[in-house]
Amino acid sequence: MFKLFVKLAVRFLFKNKLYSFINIFGLAVGIASFVLIMVYVGYERSYDKFPGSENVYRVFMDYLEGEGFEPGDAMTYNLTGPTLVQEFPEVEDYVRFLYFEKMTFVVGDKIIDQPMGSLADASYFNIFNYPLMKGDKETALKEPNTIVLSQTLAEKLFGEENPMKKTLMVVWENERVNLTVTGVMEDMPRNAHYRNNYLISFATEKTWGVFHESRLEPNWNQNNYYTYIKVVPNTDWKALQSKIMTSDIEKDEEERHNIEPIESIHLYSAKPYEVEVNGSGTRIKFLMAIAFVILVLSWMNYVNLSTSKSLERAKETGIRKVSGAQRPQLIVQSLAESVLLNVIAMGIGLGLVLLVLPFFEKILDLPLQLNAHEISTWLPIIGILLGGMLLAGLYPAILLSGYSPIKALKGKIQTTSGELNVRKGLILAQFTITIVLLVCTLVVSKQIIFLKDQPIGVELNQILALKGEVVSADNDSILFTKYKVLVSELEKIPMVKSVSMAKTYPGDSFDNLSSSRGMVLPSGNDDDKNITYHYYAQPNYFNLLGIEFVAGSTFIPSAGNDTEQVVVNETFLKTMGLGAPQQIVDKTLKFWGYEWQIKGVIKDYHHFGLKSALLPLVIRYQNDADNVLVKLDEKAVTSNGMSAAITQLKNKWEEVFPKGTFGYTFLDKKFEAQYAQEQTFGQAFKVFAGIAILIAMLGLFGLTSYTVVQRKKEIGIRKVNGATVFEVLKMLNISFVKWVFIAFLVAAPIAWYAMNKWLEGFAYKTELNWWIFAISGGGAMLIGLITVSWQSFRAAIANPVDSIRTE
């Protein structure tokens, strides 16, 4: 019997090629889109999963803002970890990190820059259970001046030689130290929010001259450390969190410690001083929603087309019933057709996934894989697909098997009120989803354009930041003199317009800003509540970046004590309540044990783009060098080429610093990189939204087919009585216009709410203009009319005699 059902199902699919193609194509594309999105979602949700990760938490700082505390800083104090272990029995161990954005390694004549590494406590491998290929986990980071390398870095430095017990030199902030290799660890996976290519023992902090004496013993003075704790298994972490927040271990009423699960950081943490730009839980929810929308639309289409086809098969069903077929047999046969069609679609869909996945990986720049052994990931996906297949096939099977054989044979099958309501619901759902997706696509695109085009208060085009580590025994003053020589030499290059030096620049890492709280204002009042952000720069820094002054001017190099000058921004004045900019120039601020004269007030500019709120900035005049900023002459570069300009800059650098590394960054590219995740999300959203709309159009095609079949005789009679093609089209299309209007009323508030939630993740956002909804409603109307009119037009031009005779 089963073989018979399969045989009949195959025969039916081959006989109805268009029906089979539309169904299989829609389901295949829907399944492929669903699987691709869920693979990406699974990857994003897999961050920081390692043996024991459920017991690991990151400690962070909350700061008092108004009447309550707000999450304020991903970094903590070097005394945080030891105190938590001592005060709370639930805390089993801790590890502290001091992060290095980049470090220069020297082995013989080989000099390389390597990003992402840390000072780390010896307890690292007890908490982060990543494999150590060589060395002892217990002792690898115990002694001062020791280092553990990643496998890739070890190969870069030592080739095929065994690196164990070998000595290398690292240079950071012009301070050198020799380290002994005590371990080699596997490269950390991409799906870790904190990745280290090397780990230097925390005890090295006491022997390396780059660190200030204040760091030598744990204290509550410098919160430059990332702290992670390991708790006793089965600890109620919410209860522990409450205890930590109310403990006031640092004896400061303006701040408190807090904890969060390490597994949640990537998607749900966006604090200042994050190690890297994290993902977004909101984006993941949006993509999951569209994945399910695409899949449900695919199944709805199948239901639409199957019920439409059931009218044409009514006589077939009547004959089978008269011949003795029972209703369960008819249901099983219909389900067999459904299962066969879905299995074919699933096979094609998975084939599409395998075909498209490499391109998907390239676009997202992520190592996405179809890991069949990850049962926890695949079981829900398989369950959803199988459950949906069964439910999608069950309704048409029950409907088809329920026709009265007498009415079926006489051609008098009529739609019941229940069936009519289902179809109305399907029409409403199709148009509602289409309008919501159109609104979301327009808003996402509009926000990304807003982020890129909105003025940020600085000019970044044709500006490079030169940065490299100088391997030299020169002290700071001699080294700075050489940097001044470099600036002078660079300014002689015809393609160079101007040169300056600064600690950081717009779009650079948050880690290159210092933050502090506690400042004596010009009025003599002591402000210890507001956090301010600091960096240093040279006098022509503002002119080079096109930053405007609203009062005062830049630093004066001839001043008696250059290190005591600062420039502040407008947000600093507002935050501190200092009044008009003109009144604050030449007044004095006191912080860090020094008096600082305010030389000028600059217009607010966006140091971190429009995703973040404006920061209260204090820019100091300091004779130090970190980034050499070079503004190129656009006309000269156009005629000579950018590569020629970079070659000349590199040659000048190597003339002044013959031993070291050279690197450069385009400021405009670095700034735009802040929006990379939003741009990728926008592209992915548009593609999948387009797929969902295409599938919705297929569903409307099915509904139109059903309507035309139902009203075939009516159309023929109207044409015999003189109805024109236009009048027939109007009759068939008017109901769809009505449903688009109703769907718009349903979709508009849904889309408005969804986009408002998404835009909450931006400090500066575009407006939800009325025309976005109008265009989306009009677009849905146009899509519906194009889809419906094709079938309607075929019915309208058909020979009415044939229509009446077949009835």
Image (tube, helix red, strand yellow):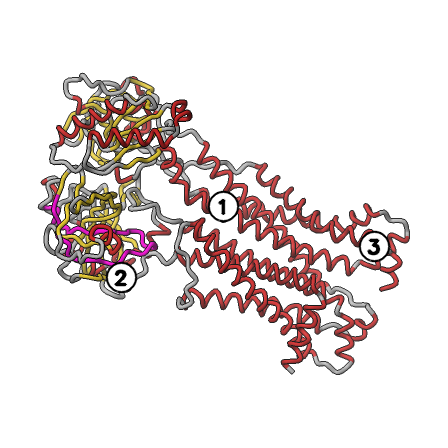
Q: Which residue is mark 1?
A: 683
Of labels 1 and 3, earlier in sequence is: 1
Amino acid type at mark 2: Asn
Between the residue at mark 2 and the residue at mark 1, the CA separation in whole angstroms equals 37 Å
Residue 411 x/y as whole percent: 82, 68
Q: Nearer the viewer, residue 346 or 127?
A: 346
Residue 590 x/y as whole percent: 18, 27
Marks 3, 2: nearer the viewer: 3
Tell me if 750 is positioned left or right of 14 in this view: left
Q: Secondary structure at mark 3?
A: loop
Q: Secondary structure at mark 1?
A: helix
Q: Which residue is mark 2?
A: 55
Q: Quadrant of the rendered structure where residue 805 is?
A: bottom right
Question: Is residue 417 something one can see in this rendering?
Answer: yes
Q: Which residue is mark 3?
A: 798
Marks 2, 1: nearer the viewer: 1
Question: Is residue 124 something one can see in this rendering?
Answer: no
Is 201 one of the magenta-colored residues?
yes
Amino acid type at mark 3: Ala
Between the residue at mark 1 and the residue at mark 3, the CA separation in whole angstroms equals 43 Å
- State which region is magenta: 177-206
Of labels 3 and 2, earlier in sequence is: 2
